[in-house]
Image (tube, rainbow, N blue to C red):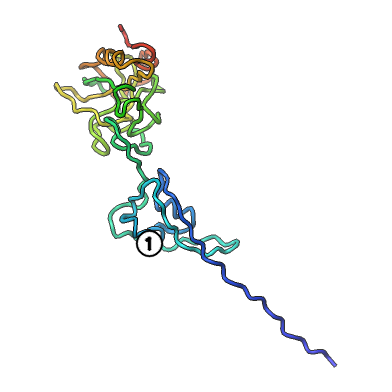
């Protein structure tokens, strides 16, 4: 007789256990970038942290976030949940901006887009200088809007202009970060990368506060060098390449300016 076939016993498969993670916020992070790296939506990350994160665009470096639980599924990519619009008007993908102190740097930001180049224009400006010794804090060269330099610097050439600070801060800066000038009095090209300079006086077009460096000089020597460049001088906005240049920082080991 034919033997009866026994029913095959199916193994019991347990569902994967939820995975819960924590994450330490780093400079430049946003809820969107943190969530996207884990196949989630920024809304789900915010929902998991509403007790400590009041607004989705207000996260700070060093802050600990709880990441929403998800179930690991081998070979299956996590699908982001539907994205809902936040109730606040703040943008969730605003990058974290660590705050720094200083006369010329109310807040360091990510590199800004260079200003669109326009026609060359002759200006009269109030020129002053700031140095490694008299920046705040002393011994600092940080800038608020890095374009070509992480910290204030430059050789004064067309390719490597020297950092200048302009009046205002943030969206109220007198000149857009990346704007370039040529200063015949010091024979250098300069670029706007810093903010917080005082408003101009005496009917000039603007005030440029030029980084002179001076790390290798004394406070008295750099102050004397800055006195020599200070004044009402000519400047060219959006200058062409090829103008006369005295390359190097205004103060390296000595004060390096025309007729010094």
Residue sitting at x 36%, y 47%: 60
Q: In this view, does 64 lie above or below 7?
A: above
Q: In which quarter of the image is the N terminus?
A: bottom right
Q: Residue 53: x and y, percent?
A: 34, 55
Residue sitting at x 38%, y 36%: 111
Q: Which of 234 and 56 is in front in this view?
A: 56
Q: Which residue lies furthest to the left in this view?
A: 202
Q: Is residue 162 above or below residue 5?
A: above
Q: Residue furthest right?
A: 1
Q: Is residue 96 left or right of residue 77?
A: left
Q: In which quarter of the image is the C terminus?
A: top left
Q: Which residue lies furthest to the bottom in this view?
A: 1
Q: Which of 122 and 48 is in front in this view?
A: 48
Residue sitting at x 67%, y 78%: 10
Q: Is residue 2 above or below residue 120?
A: below
Q: Residue 91: x and y, percent?
A: 32, 52
Q: Residues within 10 Å of mark 1 (few under 14, many from 20)?
A: some
Q: Residue 151: x and y, percent?
A: 38, 29
What residue is disc 1 on? 47
Q: Residue 200: x and y, percent?
A: 18, 25
């Amino acid at each position: 007789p034919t033997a009866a076939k026994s029913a095959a016993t199916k193994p019991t498969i347990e569902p994967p256990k939820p995975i819960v993670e924590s994450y330490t916020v780093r400079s430049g992070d946003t809820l969107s970038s943190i969530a996207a790296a884990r196949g989630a939506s920024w809304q789900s990350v915010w929902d998991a942290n509403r007790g400590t994160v009041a607004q989705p665009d207000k996260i700070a470096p060093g802050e600990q976030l709880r990441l929403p639980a998800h179930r690991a599924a081998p070979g299956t990519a996590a699908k982001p949940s539907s994205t809902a619009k936040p109730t606040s008007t703040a943008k969730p993908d605003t990058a974290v901006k660590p705050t720094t102190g200083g006369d010329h740097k109310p807040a360091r930001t990510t590199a800004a887009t260079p200003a669109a180049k326009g026609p060359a224009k002759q200006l009269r400006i109030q020129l002053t200088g700031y140095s490694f010794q008299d920046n705040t804090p002393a011994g600092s060269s940080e800038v608020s809007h890095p374009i070509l330099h992480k910290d204030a610097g430059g050789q004064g050439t067309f390719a490597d202009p020297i950092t200048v600070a302009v009046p205002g801060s943030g969206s109220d800066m007198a000149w857009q970060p990346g704007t370039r000038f040529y200063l015949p009095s010091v024979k250098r090209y300069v670029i706007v990368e810093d903010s917080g300079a005082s408003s101009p006086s005496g009917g000039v077009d603007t005030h440029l506060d030029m980084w002179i460096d001076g790390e290798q000089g004394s406070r008295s020597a750099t102050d004397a060098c800055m006195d020599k460049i200070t004044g009402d001088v000519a400047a060219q906005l959006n200058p062409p390449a090829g103008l006369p240049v005295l390359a190097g920082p205004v103060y390296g080991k000595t004060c390096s300016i025309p007729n010094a």
